[in-house]
Amino acid sequence: MSRLFLLLLSFAATTVSFSNEIKVVSQIDDVTVFLQGAQVNRSGSVTIPAGTSDVIFTGISPLLKRESLQAGTKANISILAVHYETKTVEKAQNKEELAELEKAQLEKQEALSKLYAKLEVIRTREALIANLAYYQSQNMSATIDDIVKAEQVIASKLEAIKLEALQVEKQIEEMNRDVNQLSQKIAAMGVIYESIEPRVVIKVKAAAEVKAKFTLSYFVSNARWYPSYNLNVKSLDEPLLIDYQANISQQTGEDWKDVKLTLSTVDPNLSGQKPILTPWYLVLNQMNQRPDETNYNRYTPNQVNTVSGRITDQYGEPLPYATVLVVGSTVGTYTDADGFYTLNIPQGKNQISVSFIGYNPVTIYVTANTHNIVLAEKPLMLEEIIVVDALEAENYNYSYAYADEVVVLDAYESQNISYDYSAVEVVTSSSIREKKSNQPRLNKQAIYSPTYSAPVEMERQVNVVSAEFEIEEKYSIPSDEKNYNVKIDEIEKKVFYQYYCAPRFNTDVFLTAQMTDWESLSLLEGQANIFFEGTFVGSSLLDAKFVGDTLDISLGRDKRIVVDRVKEKEFSKYKIVGDEASKSVKWVISVKNNKDVPINLIVEDQFPLTSDSRIQIETDEVQDAKVDETTGIITWDIKLAGSKMTEVSFKYKVTYPIGNDVYLD
């Protein structure tokens, strides 16, 4: 009796130690999207009974970073622990759907039986017609005309019967296909599927039953955004219209439905630790290398301004909507439906990275104007889950719990991977223990994540190291491979329109917009589509990374301003005097404004320079121009009325020892 009493007491104690599991229906309230990654903020309300309970948040991204978990509530309860885990769940059988499928299958089978009966009747009629033909041929009293007429009738009847039989056979084939498909669906519904349900467990303790609203925030890595612009110039006497947009994509495994968005220029994946210089010792006959950098390409100035190509998988199939980013900048784009892309490369940058859901990302150096890139599929798998401890919070007014022991995540978690709930392996407790024992650990620390309040309207918040854009309108961003455009702002800015031409290299005239007081706009480096006088004229790069009072924006070429550079033969001569040879050159540059409005045009050309004392260069004074004696650059600032033409010119003479040559334009 005493042994039985002890067993019952032990069982009762074990039962009491279990916490109540309470599932909370939560929704995503707002998301802060970084250049790489995003912070998701959820909330949900539930009634908490007295005692200890486990509040379960489901529908969570399986790719969240465990150390970023943060939970809170204003209710009069204590949060004892917060951790991430997965649970194997069975797919519930939909009995109503199963009944409908079985009913449809029965109806199809009955219709199929009728078709088989109809086909049997047709075959019987066909046999009767064949027998009739045989008896007619055996009738010795029939004349030739009777036989011919009988054959015609029999042939007509037989043809109609065979056509009817073919039609019924086709119906039977289609009906069999429908019945087989229904059978497969019914069989599939009879199979019990197991899937992995990611969830966050918040262990709480309440003195009495209370209604509580919980907030949950966490960081996910498979999200990003980059800026782009539509620059619209209606006319040269109107302001520049800037359509400031964000291109957002995410593959986190959870859809963001009707959420408030905040866009941040921060990259949380970058270390905030400043570099530390150590003593630098010179050694004879030893090549010098920069610390931790050995790749020559990293120090080679970039000479490629635009790169284009196609992104495919290892089988040659195009990857639509793959993300292409310039490493170390906010410039990016995505491929079209056929996998093609075009990207402007900022000065000083020479790497691009390509990512696509379900494929290993690739980073390459840009060494040519065309790069076709192949991405390899990555095996999908779920990392074994490590349950972390938590720091108990005793504040009853507002409780928080932070991850207590930070776990170093596997490398693939920081990559752009997709999550397929039907293609995961079940995690066992033994694999969890094995994984936990082999995992490196960090010291205890509290993980703090920033929170953002929902604004009434979009505002720009600028600080020393970052900018944030709070979007007034709510958006839905599904977890897929596509990019979604979000409007940041529409800006109307008065600018000074300036044309520019360097006819020695290219006689095309480029329109630029010079913008002052632009720092308050928080413009970022990005690609820009240019619309001039209602027509798309191409794309450019809005380069806003350099500090200065004036921002120069290239708006493309204007073909209605024509510039020509011609060598005037009368003044262009070659002479030999004694032991010296000389070449005289005169260039005439003509400008024609075919527009109806006046323009401001900067034209630049140049005198040659030399560091060889044997070469003498004589230049004539240039009218209405500035000459930089150090660089030899000649600058004309031309103001030209509509439908007018003008000319400028310059000439020079080069003298050098005979027997040599100098090569001029």
Image: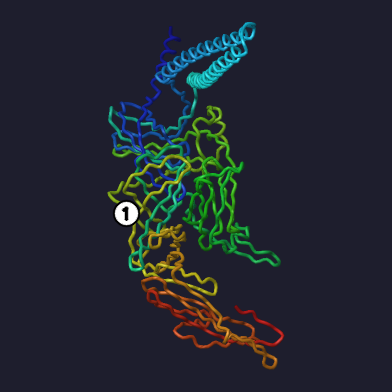
Q: Nearer the viewer, residue 656 or 62?
A: 656
User: Is 315 left or right of 320, judged from the image as shown?
Assistant: right
User: From the viewer's perspective, is residue 305 above or below residue 222?
Assistant: below
Q: Nearer the viewer, residue 556 or 405?
A: 556
**Residue indicated by mark 1:** 459
| Figure disc tally | 1
Counting other residues with Cα less than 10 Å from the Cα at mark 1, is it few (<14), some (14-19), or many (20 or more)? Answer: some
Q: Nearer the viewer, residue 252 or 610?
A: 610
Q: Quadrant of the N terminus?
A: top left
Q: Provide residue 372's location: percent of width, then percent of height.
A: 59, 51
- The colour scheme of the drawn protein is rainbow
Q: Provide residue 537's location: percent of width, then percent of height.
A: 45, 61
Q: Provide residue 95's location: percent of width, then percent of height.
A: 41, 18
Q: Tell me if residue 472 can be seen.
A: yes
Farthest bottom residue in view: 578
Q: Nearer the viewer, residue 99 or 125?
A: 125
- Tag 1 secondary structure: loop
User: Is 244 left or right of 113, judged from the image as shown?
Assistant: left
Q: Quadrant of the C terminus?
A: bottom right
User: From the viewer's perspective, is residue 159 above or below residue 401?
Assistant: above
Q: Tell me if residue 191 can be seen.
A: no
User: From the viewer's perspective, is residue 570 above or below residue 54?
Assistant: below
Q: Type of residue at label 1?
A: Glu
Q: Provide residue 472's location: percent of width, then percent of height.
A: 31, 48
Q: Residue 59's quadrant in the figure? A: top left
Q: Residue 283's quadrant in the figure? A: bottom right
User: Is 78 left or right of 330, judged from the image as shown?
Assistant: left
